[in-house]
Image (spheres, helix red, strand yellow):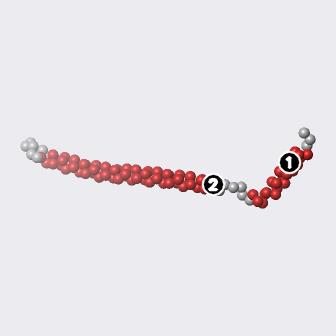
Amino acid sequence: MSVGNGHDGELRIIREFWLQLRAIDQRRLARERAAIANDVDLERILQQQRHAGAGRDREQQRRVEKRARTHHVLQKRPLVVAALERALRCIANKPL
């Protein structure tokens, strides 16, 4: 590129400087793109894990509800029966 008025050296320096800045900018953009891609990938993975965890929670809750029983019922049964019989006896002995 020849300009005829002696500015060839200056234009070459400006062009080289501009090319270096462009290369630096492209590397920076590549790093930013990689960081953004990593963030998006991480968000996708976390979302999949949330959905999988919710599925496990629903399955666990279903199993709990299916097997929900009072603990130690047989040990407390005589007390419950005695209290119920006492209440029914009192009601049966009252005149109407």
User: Who's the residue at 69% across and 55% down the image?
Assistant: 69
Q: Which mark is residue 13?
A: none
Q: Are marks 1 and 2 in contact (CB under 8 Å)?
A: no
| Residue 59 drawn at (x, y percent) | 56, 54
Q: Give the mark nearer the N terminus: 1 vs 2.
A: 2
As drawn, 84 above or below 5: below
| Residue 17 drawn at (x, y percent) | 21, 49
Question: In this rendering, would 40 be left or right of 1?
Answer: right
Which residue is at the front of the view, 1 or 27?
A: 27
In this figure, which residue is indicated by the disc labeled 1? 88
Q: Secondary structure at mark 2?
A: helix
Q: Secondary structure at mark 1?
A: helix
| Crowd rating for badge 1 (residues with CA inside 10 Å; few <14, some 14–19, many 20+) | few
| Residue 4 drawn at (x, y percent) | 7, 43
User: Who's the residue at 19% across and 50% down the image?
Assistant: 16
Specify the amino acid type for callout 1. Answer: Leu
Specify the amino acid type for callout 2. Answer: Lys
Question: In this rendering, would 44 be left or right of 27?
Answer: right
In this figure, which residue is indicated by the disc labeled 2? 66
Which residue is at the front of the view, 18 or 72?
A: 72
Question: In this rendering, would 12 be left or right of 95?
Answer: left
Q: Quadrant of the C terminus?
A: top right
Whole-number angstrom distance, CA of label 1 to CA of label 2: 33 Å
| Crowd rating for badge 2 (residues with CA inside 10 Å; few <14, some 14–19, many 20+) | few
Q: Residue furthest top?
A: 96
| Residue 10 drawn at (x, y percent) | 15, 46
User: Who's the residue at 59% across and 53% down the image?
Assistant: 62
Question: In this rendering, would 3 be left or right of 81?
Answer: left
Which residue is at the front of the view, 80 or 54?
A: 80
